[in-house]
Image (cartoon, grey):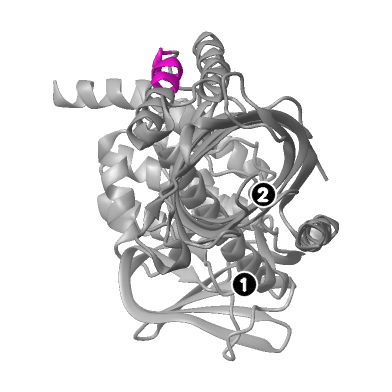
Amino acid sequence: MRALALGGFLLGLCTRSAAAQHATLGPAVAVAEYREVASSLRYSGVGPGASARVTWHRFTLDAAIVSIQMKPASGSAATQSFRATEIDGWLRWDALNYMSFEVGLTQRSPDSDFAAQSLGAVRVGARTRYLLGPGATIWLRGDYLAGAQFSGGGTAPLALELGLGLDLELSRHVRAQVDYSFQRLDRKTNPAGGAKASVPIEQSLARLGLTVGL
Amino acid sequence: MRSSGLLLMLALGIPAAVRAQAAPAPQNATLRAAIQAYENLDFARAITLARRALSERMTGPDQARAYELLGFSYSATDSQVKAVDAFKQAILLDPDRQLDPNKVSPKITSLFYSALGQVLVVRQLQADSARFIGGQGAVPLRFTVTSPARVRVRAVSGSTSLLVDSAVLTGAVNVRWLARLPNGDPVPSGTWLIVVEATSGQNTFSASRSLRVTYSPVDTLPHLTSLPGYKELPETEVPPQSWRPLGLAFLFTGSAAAGALALNNDGLGSAPGRELIGVSVVTLAAGFVMTLRKPAPRPAEANILYNRLLREQLSQRNADIAKENVKRRQQVQLTVVPLPKTGSAR
């Protein structure tokens, strides 16, 4: 339900693009690997997605949604597949030509609470970028995922996300976006009020998208 | 010896000077005979005939010429006082009369100038053609006053009489007529008479010159599209080709890989690499392609600043021109042209 609400919000942003400087929207495909608790619990999968961007002066609002069918990786002890829907949002402010600061949200929801933890967090970080050539921009970002919340409870004092990406202008209205993100969440729980247990989570996700200027 | 030299000088110089000084043939027959006698070096007869001619009815120019011939003849006969008196009469009749020093002997020329210093006349009154915006220019006037005198210069048209200058003067005089009414407005168009009156004791002399004053609109200035001598510079520049894009792609992907390795939780096994490798390959390929491609033009800040200053200057100049044109549309341009000479009055 929340995913639908955020999707509606994104659509609303896109329809208001006339007032913005630039707005892009397009489909994407993502591959991901998800690990939880121990090295034996690994999933990998592929799924469709979409991304949108609205630029207004020195502000950029990025949003992405992917729905990945996670399957137990080879050699994994996991037995159950699940579909994870991840929604990401970034609001960026360009402080310099090559540096910007960003805040945002991330929400990952598996369709089965028993297979994986859902995650919700606020991200705060910075991004640096460089123009490689005409229409090609490379970027690198680092975010802290603050206030991470899990469906199974617990906290993650160390929750970081690293990103690498490339924006390519294929034509005047069409852009390709390739990005990689790596999340590490050192989740700790104390089930039944006992001693704290460490249940780390990691996810690496690569996304390839094509967007069209509106 | 002395008289033979004088005779030679007179024979070679003076008759030619008389012919040169008196281009059109005189109407009076007696005067023509006097000139012929002078050319035949019969100075006594020339004097007699010139005097007889002066007792006859003659035109003003013939009278002046008769007195000049008397001056030449008296000079030839060494009657200097009489020669100066004759020249004085010639000058009073024709104040603008000149002797050509290349054709007339120094002796005669000096007697002529001696006569000039003994009479009060205003000679060679000249006005130059001029074109100027009303109130911002002047008409140059030049004349010569032969003796110290109170000189009043006036511009007269119909019942309007404007004082141009009033001073005690002698010699060559330059005066500027501003062509303005007392209230500062330009003088009305039409014919104006510049009158120069010289007064010294009982002697008075005046000379005049007619001018035509016409009005025309003042030309407006065209707006500028560029500043002369300056042109805008390109606001972007293409940096030289380099390996920098590939190097940066390596740096960014290397940083991401190192970060992912550092962040990896060993308890979850080795860091996942499939996604990172895929994105890194694409990124490095883009860096390589961009290295081979012509670099993207980038803004040339100095040129942008220069162009901005240039445009500011241009708009400032055009604003000034617009202001000037508003002023010019309210002004009038005067064209002053001297009319053919009508003579002088005594």
Return the x and y of residue B298 as percentages of the image width and height.
50, 32
Residue at horizontal 38 percent and vertical 23 percent from the top:
B254
The kind of secondary structure element at disc 2 is: loop
Badge nearest the viewer, 2 or 1: 2
Q: Which residue, given by chain and number where applicable, does mark 2 sit on?
A: A114
The 10 Å Cα crowd at callout 1, few under 14, some 14 to 19, many 20 or more, is many
Q: Which residues are magenta?
A: B242-250
Residue B175 quadrant: bottom left
Residue at horizontal 34 percent and vertical 86 percent from the top:
B201
Q: Residue furthest right?
A: A15
Does B247 lie within the magenta span? yes
Does B274 lie within the magenta span? no
Return the x and y of residue B232 as percentages of the image width and height.
54, 37
The 10 Å Cα crowd at callout 2, few under 14, some 14 to 19, many 20 or more, is few
- Answer yes or no: are tags 2 and 1 on the same subunit: no
In this view, the residue in front, B82 or A29, is: A29
Q: Is residue A166 visible?
A: no
Q: Which residue, given by chain and number where applicable, does mark 1 sit on?
A: B134
The kind of secondary structure element at disc 1 is: loop
